[in-house]
Image (cartoon, helix red, strand yellow):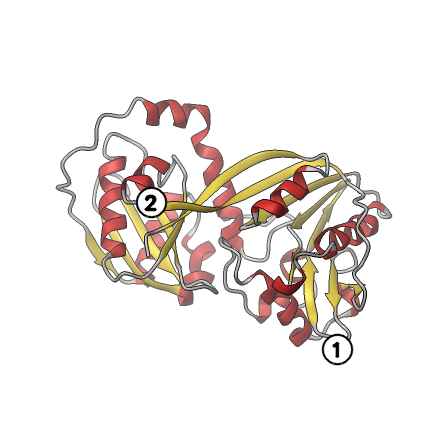
Amino acid sequence: MKISLVAPPHAPLNPVLNMKKTLRSRGGAAGQARWAARPPYPALVTRLYPVRPEDALALLADLLSCAPDDLRPLLAQLLAAWSCPGAAGGAGVIALRRTPRADLEVLGGARPGPRQAEVALALLRAASVAGTPLSAYADDALLPKDVLCTLGWRRAGQYTEWRGALPTPDAPVPAGLRLLPLADVPDLSVRRHAQATYADQLGHTLVGDTDLIPGAHGSDDAVGHVALNASGQGVGVCRAWLAGDTLTVGSPSVHPALRHTPLRHALLRATGDAARARGARRLVMQAWGDTPAETQADAGLGLDAVTVTPIYLSRS
């Protein structure tokens, strides 16, 4: 969960995706050592307070070390929130965010320290009362994996950041489809259909027209590509950000009915070739909710998985 105070040229479609990435890096070896040395879970005497989503923004911003205005675009997607009081900004806060799926995404968590497990458990139990499926990133800085497992949550996906030399996968475009630069497809309805191919993948969030317009969030539509079927409907997309010799993309997505084809890597190849023509030599690929088969295919591209953060789902 990461929000950049100043969006980099490769900022993803939604600023909260950058926020997730930074917070995942906070735990590191020190965070893992701290978690391993934690005391047993204490008795749960934590006091929680429901808060309005609009009032939760400042608490979340303090927890996530960003400005409240960075989170304000998410306000319409927040359904409920709870806080736990404590010293200097409180012991923890979570908010539930709508997603394109049945699950609600948990934003926030509990501050590291001797009460982290107690506070995180209490917050998650409060959020689970309604019985709606919840999803959350396992992160020692906010919601440690052991806490999620204690509640019976299961690992259902992951975030992966891949880095390495710009690959040239041998992936032909499937028959009946064509790939075009996004700059050649300004129609928002086509872009919306293409972007909707991400909707069932865990970790992806709701997007609006401001996320789909040409050049949204600094994306380079002359480099990014979209896949169209014979009817001209968007069935896949690869958004791109180019900075110097580095191409940054969200993991390409394709329609579920086409995921058995080479289309995903064909989109990556087309986007990479366009970036290479402008001097790119390195790739950063951020992947949310990819299937095990997709992750295995990406591992064959010669890239290094520099960050892997599990995504957990609550019991249904």
**Which residue is labeled 2 in the image?**
109
**Which residue is labeled 1 in the image?**
231
Q: Secondary structure at mark 2?
A: strand
For the question of whether residue 208 can be seen, the reply is yes
Residue under the image location 65 percent in, 76 percent down: 189
Residue under the image location 41 percent in, 38 percent down: 139
For the question of whether residue 2 can be seen, the reply is no
- Residue 194 drawn at (x, y percent): 65, 67
**What type is the residue that disc 2 sits on?**
Gly
> Which residue occupies the foreground of this view, 87 or 169?
169
| Quarter of the figure with the C terminus | bottom left
For disc 2, the neighbor class at 10 Å (few under 14, some 14 to 19, many from 20) is many
- Residue 94 drawn at (x, y percent): 32, 51
**What type is the residue that disc 1 sits on?**
Ser
Residue under the image location 52 percent in, 61 percent down: 200
Q: Secondary structure at mark 1?
A: loop
- Above or below residue 259? Residue 120 is above
For disc 1, the neighbor class at 10 Å (few under 14, some 14 to 19, many from 20) is few
Name the mark on residue 14.
none
- Above or below residue 45? Residue 306 is above
